[in-house]
Amino acid sequence: MSTRRARVVTADQWGKPDRSEAGEPICRWCRGLVVSPRRTFCSDACVHEWKIRSSPWYVRREVKKHDKGICRLCGVNVVKAHREWSRAKPPASDRAGRKRWRAARPRWEADHIVPVADGGGECGLENYRLLCRACHVRVTTEWRSRRSSEMLQRCSASTIAPTAAPMPAPESTPTAQVLGLTTTTMNHR
């Protein structure tokens, strides 16, 4: 686990295989040899694992498929709710109704079970779950309050030590000595 969210492939690396010391193409995920006609990954399984860690769109699609569109906490079927919401679309002439309709859109999130800040980054599907928007807000709020209280406890338990040496007296600095400044002359300038 990691606190990083995703692996990054830069633009100049895109489509170009990583190479072994012998110059042969190696898989970006498992570091095994890549056999033609493949170029950057040795198998579909490696492509899947790489995409889970690098593509939020792919994660959402796979989490929705894995959890069958059902919120893991409250059991709401967000796919069914979205379908019903789509069918209830008011006519274009009802602008206020359209605005209310858009605001009521059922939303869902692909949530990290172990938050990224706690080491849940760069994970596979095992650390994701589908949550409806209301459950995700509640879980995130609870986690933030727990984390902030832990931080406060750590801060109050430790004493604050000075991080730098005390400032020298103004007249003892090299600049003050060169200019012939003393505390009394500095206060009057």
Image (cartoon, rainbow, N blue to C red):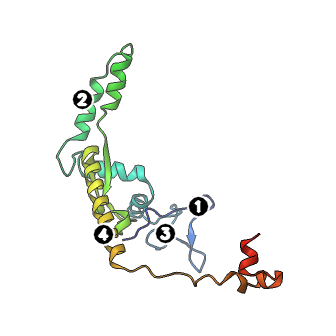
Question: Which residue is more in the foreground, 154 or 21?
Answer: 154
Give the crowd class for mark 4: few <14, some 14-19, many >=20 residues within 10 Å: few
Q: Position of residue 23 (x, y in %)?
A: 61, 76
Q: What element carries label 2?
A: helix
The residue at 46%/82% (across/down) is 161
The answer to whether residue 22 shows anywhere in this view is yes
Q: What element carries label 1?
A: loop
> What's the mark number on residue 81?
none
Disc 3, disc 1: CB below 8 Å? no
Disc 1, disc 2: CB below 8 Å? no
The residue at 36%/65% (across/down) is 123
Give the crowd class for mark 3: few <14, some 14-19, many >=20 residues within 10 Å: many
Identify the residue position indicated by label 1 in the image.
Answer: 10
Disc 4, disc 2: CB below 8 Å? no
Identify the residue position indicated by label 4 in the image.
Answer: 150
Identify the residue position indicated by label 2 in the image.
Answer: 84
Q: Is mark 4 on a helix, strand or loop?
A: helix
The answer to whether residue 65 shows anywhere in this view is no
Identify the residue position indicated by label 3 in the image.
Answer: 27
Q: Which badge, 4 or 2, is on the more N-terminal residue? A: 2
Question: Which residue is more in the foreground, 104 or 161?
Answer: 161
Question: Which residue is more in the foreground, 15 or 152?
Answer: 152
Q: Which amino acid does label 4 sit on?
A: Glu
Nearest to the eye among marks 3 and 1: give it.
1
Q: What residue type is labelled 3?
A: Cys
